[in-house]
Every structure is written in C-alpha cells, then in structure tokens.
Image (cartoon, grey):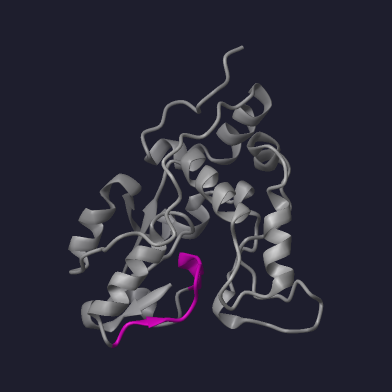
Amino acid sequence: MILIPEISTVLILVPRTGSGSLRRAVLREYPEAMQIYRHMEADGIPYGYDTWRRVGVVRHPIDRLWSLYRFLGKFGGGQHDPAFVAALRNSVDRPFGEWLIHNEIVFTSPYDRANRGRFWPGYACNHPIPENRKSQAVYIRPDLGTEYWTFEHLDQLAASLGVTMQERENATTHDPAPALEQEAEAYARSVFAWDFSVTGAAQCRAASR
C-alpha cells in the first residue's frame, strides 16, 4: 500500500499483478509518496486517508497464481530471512494443481517463520490467508469503492497516476499455466468466482477429460 499525497491516492499492491513495477514508478515520481505496507488490503487504509481515491490491479486468477507459483520456486536473496525463503520455496515443491488446492503457507505475513519473536510491520495485512485461497476481492474490496483496473491495462493505470513504468524486474516468463484437472478447476471456480468475473475469464484452462 502506497499513500500518494500529491494526487490524494492510495495504491493497493496486490501480489503478482505488476505491483512491484508500479510501486517503483510511483516512488520515483512522487517524493512525498509513502509505502507503509507491502500488501495491505484496502480495508487497512489508515483513518483519514480512506477519503482519498483508492486503486489497484486485478489479474486473471490462474495467471496470477501461476506467476506466484513460479516466483516462489526462485524466491530468495535480498534481506529476506532464510526461514521465510525456505518456507516459500518448499511450498511449491509439488505440481501446480496440487499447490493450488492444498497450499497452507501464507505469502504476506509480518510474523517470524523462524520462531524468534521478530515482527515486520511493513508486511502486516488484515487477512493473512494463503494466496491460493485469497480472492483479489479481499485485497481490492470493491464494496468499499476501490477502483480496479485489469492487468492488461496496467500501463493505462500508470498513466492515470501520472507515472511511466519501466521494465518489470520481478516478472516471470510468459509460459501459460498448465491445464487444470477437474478438482483444481472446480476449486478455482469456487474460490475465485469474483476474480474470473471481473477479468472477463469465462473458463479456467481445464485439462481435457
């Protein structure tokens, strides 16, 4: 979540929706912009700032989770704690369809996975749910009036914020998600019904049966 005083806007950063590139563009352009949380949901906007324009990006749910799945397999480096890195990498040590249904590891959480009592407030969120169970509606909260743009219109959103995006540093390759078996397809349709409806995706990439 980024507060942008210059344009009275709150940017909600949904994981794997181009949020990193958009975040960097905003912070380059606006000196007063403040990233107070990495992936806080729209219902976590601080008092007073909730009167500003709020905006975020929504991506096809299977594409987003496939991107996250591949990202986690290579996750690491930087300032991340080794226990955090290991937990996320180990979570994807199984086929995508199995991870989609059964993953229990939360991607964004301020709590210490090494059990040493540490806490990172910048990673706090109101709904620490595994991403394979967390509709983007939980991040965006359309019922609160958040304006959302589809991933395909990311550049147009950037332009509406008065910024220009550069090359995406954390982008994964454009390989399509593998076909889903019947159980995984039914699961995705149930959990991500809102996500499918707003991205115009009538069908999952289902395996032939």
Residue at figure coordinates x 69%, y 68% from the top left: 84
Quarter assignment of residue 97 = top right
Q: Would residue 135 be visible to someone looking at this image?
A: yes
Which quadrant holds the N terminus? bottom left
Quarter assignment of residue 184 = top right
Q: Would residue 52 be visible to someone looking at this image?
A: no
The segment highlighted magenta reads 32-44
Q: Answer with left or right where residue 143 lies relative to residue 138.
A: left
- For this orientation, the residue located farthest to the right is 115
Residue at figure coordinates x 28%, y 71% from the top left: 25
Which quadrant holds the C terminus? top right
Asked if residue 41 is among those painted magenta in the image, a careful observer would answer yes
Q: Answer with left or right where residue 74 lies relative to residue 48.
A: right
**117 and 90: which one is in front?**
90
Per the picture, the main secondary structure of the magenta-coloured stretch is loop
Residue 42 lies, with reference to residue 72, above or below; the image says below
Residue 127 lies, with reference to residue 78, above or below; the image says above
Asked if residue 77 is among those painted magenta in the image, a careful observer would answer no
Residue at figure coordinates x 68%, y 56% from the top left: 89
Residue 170 lies, with reference to residue 64, above or below; the image says below
| Number of dots carrying numbers | 0
Residue 123 picture location, percent across and down: 57, 74
Residue 78 picture location, percent across and down: 56, 75
Residue 113 picture location, percent across and down: 75, 71
- For this orientation, the residue located farthest to the bottom is 32
Q: Answer with left or right where residue 163 lies relative to residue 206.
A: left
Quarter assignment of residue 182 = top right
Residue 31 picture location, percent across and down: 27, 87
Residue 158 lies, with reference to residue 202, above or below; the image says below
Q: Answer with left or right where residue 5 lies relative to residue 104.
A: left
Residue at figure coordinates x 33%, y 75% from the top left: 51
